[in-house]
């Protein structure tokens, strides 16, 4: 079982989308500075998680969430969940790591 996760930087408001078998563990890695692409933007909060049946499905969903329509989908989901939309545009690349 894989998950697609979205993190939001508490420092700059940007989001990071990735896949992992354990999103909570991966969040700790991001916040500990172990992920090169995000260590200058920490700390992060986990704002969205979606379960996928396998790595291939998770990767497809991750790519969708990084598209224009996918970002709009995440924006609307987070807005309904009560998160502020204070992200800046730009995409981040996330890879599974466990």
Image (cartoon, grey):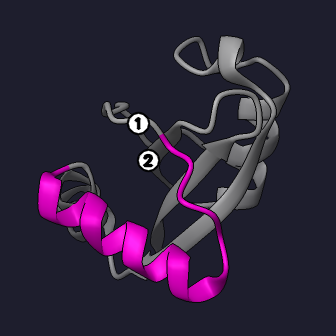
Q: Would residue 52 appear left or right of 96 to someone viewing this image?
A: left
Q: Residues within 10 Å of mark 1 (few under 14, many from 20)?
A: many
Measured as percent of width and height from the top left, residue 94 is found at 41, 36
Q: CA distance from mark 1 to mark 2?
A: 6 Å
Q: Quadrant of residue 34?
A: top right
Measured as percent of width and height from the top left, residue 11 is found at 75, 28
Query: Depth-wise, is mark 1 or mark 2 nearer the camera?
Result: 2
Residue under label 1: 94
Q: Residues within 10 Å of mark 2 (few under 14, many from 20)?
A: many
Report helix, strand or loop for mark 2: strand
Q: Residue at x 65, y 28 (%)?
A: 12
The answer to whether residue 79 is magenta is yes
Report helix, strand or loop for mark 1: loop
Residue under label 2: 17
Which comes sooner in the sequence, label 1 or label 2? 2
Q: Which residues are magenta?
A: 67-87
Q: Residue at x 53, y 59 (%)?
A: 85
Is residue 61 in sight in this rendering?
A: no
The answer to whether residue 73 is magenta is yes
Q: Residue at x 68, y 45 (%)?
A: 26
Q: Are marks 1 and 2 in contact (CB under 8 Å)?
A: yes
Q: Is residue 2 above or below residue 30?
A: below
Q: Is residue 65 above or below residue 36?
A: below
């Amino acid at each position: 079982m894989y998950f697609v996760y979205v993190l939001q930087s508490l420092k700059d408001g940007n989001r990071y989308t990735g896949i992992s078998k354990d999103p909570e563990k991966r969040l700790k890695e991001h916040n500990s500075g172990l992920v090169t692409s995000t260590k200058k933007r920490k700390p992060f909060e986990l704002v969205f998680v979606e379960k996928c049946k396998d790595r291939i499905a998770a990767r497809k969903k991750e790519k969708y969430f990084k598209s224009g329509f996918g970002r709009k989908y995440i924006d609307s989901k987070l807005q309904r969940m009560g998160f502020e939309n204070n992200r800046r545009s730009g995409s981040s690349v996330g890879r599974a790591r466990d």
